[in-house]
Image (cartoon, rainbow, N blue to C red):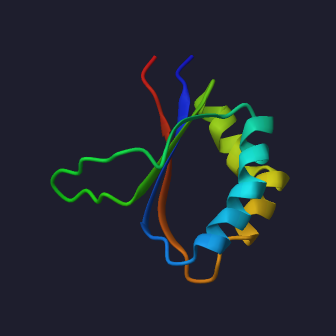
Amino acid sequence: MAKGYWASVYPAASDPEGLAAYSRLAGPAVRAAGGRTLSRDGRVVAHEAGTTQRVVLIEFDSFEQAVAAYESEAYQEALVALPDGFERDFRIVEGVD
């Protein structure tokens, strides 16, 4: 079974306190759903249209698990904590089997 991944890029993180509030809720919600953080705030080398802002990569045992984690009540509560106007590029992608 192919793994599932959350890939998030934060082109504008102008409210670090708001992001911290989200992270305090999102981290436990992701772990409870079986997610494993592979990368967060590490170094980035961007090419083509890429950006060097914050990147987060989370792995799940399956694509379906990744989708269910996003739709979970706990993660939806975390999303409410994101500050108004907060910008991120968030995707759920299926890995290769």
Which of the 4 quarters of the picture holds residue 68? Answer: top right
Q: Is residue 52 left or right of residue 68?
A: left
- Please tell me whether residue 65 is drawn above or below residue 78 in the rendered image: above
- Please tell me whether residue 46 is drawn above or below residue 18 in the rendered image: above
Residue plotted at (75% across, 56% down): 24
Q: From the top left corner, tell me how far across and down residue 7 is, in percent.
A: 48, 46
Q: Is residue 17 left or right of residue 55?
A: right
Viewer-closest of 15 and 5: 15
Q: Is residue 94 left or right of residue 72?
A: left
Q: In this figure, what is the number of numbered marks?
A: 0
Residue plotted at (78% across, 45% down): 28
Residue plotted at (49% across, 51% down): 91
Q: From the top left corner, tell me how far across and down residue 61 is, in percent.
A: 63, 24
Q: Residue furthest left?
A: 48
Q: Residue furthest right?
A: 73
Residue plotted at (46% across, 28% down): 95
Q: From the top left corner, tell me how far across and down residue 17 is, in percent.
A: 65, 72
- Please tell me whether residue 83 is drawn above or below residue 78 in the rendered image: below
User: Could you tell me which quadrant the N terminus lies in?
Assistant: top right
Which of the 4 quarters of the picture holds residue 89? Answer: bottom left
Q: From the top left corner, tell me how far across and down residue 18 is, in percent.
A: 66, 73
